[in-house]
Image: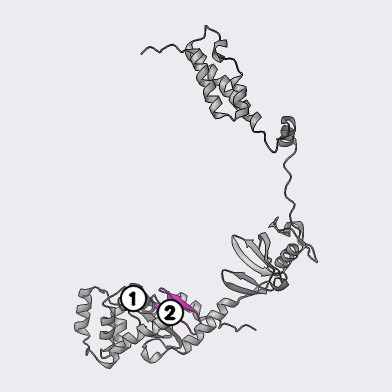
Amino acid sequence: MNAQPIKRGLLSKQIKKVLMRLLPPPAARLVQALPQALPQALPQALPPALSLTLSLTLSLTVLLALSACSHPAKHPSPPPAQLSTQSVSKPAPKPTPIQPQLANPAKPSQQQPAVAGDNTPQTHAVIAAIHTKYPRLSVSSISQIATPQGQPVFQLTAAGRLIVTNSTVDFLVEGGHLIVGVGEDVRNVSDDLARLSAVKIYNNLPLNLALPEVYGKGERKVVIFEDPDCPICQQQEHNMDAAGAALNATVYVIPFPLLNAHPDALRKAAWLMCTTSPASAWHTWMVSADTTDKGWAAFAAVHPAKEGCPNSKIAALGVVLAHSLGLRRTPTIFFPNGTVTQGALSAEDMEAIWGTPMPVAPR
């Protein structure tokens, strides 16, 4: 298809109309004063397409220049020669790091990196105290966030963790945990308090509702809330069964059927409680190879129960007890030292927890 010739005078008028609409009034008046046939100044010998390209280029150049004149920069850039000199021969200045005011200044290789945030004598002192008390804690930023009753509080960022402390770094608060101590002797007071509370709960658990499983001499103790239809509880029983006598523990199992997750669990728990040997029947069922409905039918035929026996109420009492403790998952495991876990533990995991010292009450 043959291209139609371009009417250059018309193009000039259209371009001027567009410029006058886009530019603010002062610049538009300048456009109005331009020659009427801007593209007509182009050599007549040029092909129409090239003439159009040059016309548009010239028009856009005028547009940009007028825009710059009508909207001057608030902060003009330095002259090109100055920019070029600075970028080539003079590197950009580095921020001055905050130097902790230590009594015994560390060697340069031991100093912490630059710290962002507030640059005040108070923040310097906090960083110095952090460096002394917690040398492994590398602070990247610090700011004073409050001054309750005249006591400033500071927020630190270290390895992506938000930490709050006071001006003398007597404590650290991170994620709701209160941490005290110096150097390697650091205690999580919040964890200690939680474990102390769990110790009291453990000591008051009604073990008369529990099914004791004895491994070896049974010298160590643990209480587990289990659901007879819970696969993870079954895995926990398998782990302890595999350890055998080496576990050297008495495991107190308290039935805790999860009514919403396993609708048939309460009936099964009541059945197991009414067998001739509830503890043995519970463990046998939990480690059986077939825990499907068909497997349960076969198991119940071998382990008959007297339905409605007094012990059947223990299953419902276990649910009430678990809910009163705020439990929602099985297995939940209580150790005498206040450690509480959820999910299946290996024999090695249990050994490590039994070896954990008892929590210490805050002084």
In the rendered image, residue 331 lying in the magenta stretch gets the answer yes
Structural distance between the alpha carbons of marks 2 and 1: 22 Å
User: In the rendered image, which quarter is residue 58 located in?
Assistant: top right
- Image disc number at residue 326: 2
Residue at the spot of label 1: 234
**Residue 70 place in picture, x, y as percent:** 64, 30
**Residue 189 place in picture, x, y as percent:** 60, 77
Q: Residues within 10 Å of mark 2 (few under 14, many from 20)?
A: few
Span highlighted in magenta in the image = 330-347
Q: Is 337 displayed left or right of 121 in the figure?
A: left
Tell which of 226 and 121 is nearer to you: 121
Quadrant containing the N terminus is top left
Q: Earlier in the sequence, mark 2 or mark 1?
A: 1
Q: Residues within 10 Å of mark 1 (few under 14, many from 20)?
A: many
Assign a secondary structure to mark 2.
loop
Residue at image point 47% right, 78% down: 340
Tell which of 84 and 353 is nearer to you: 84
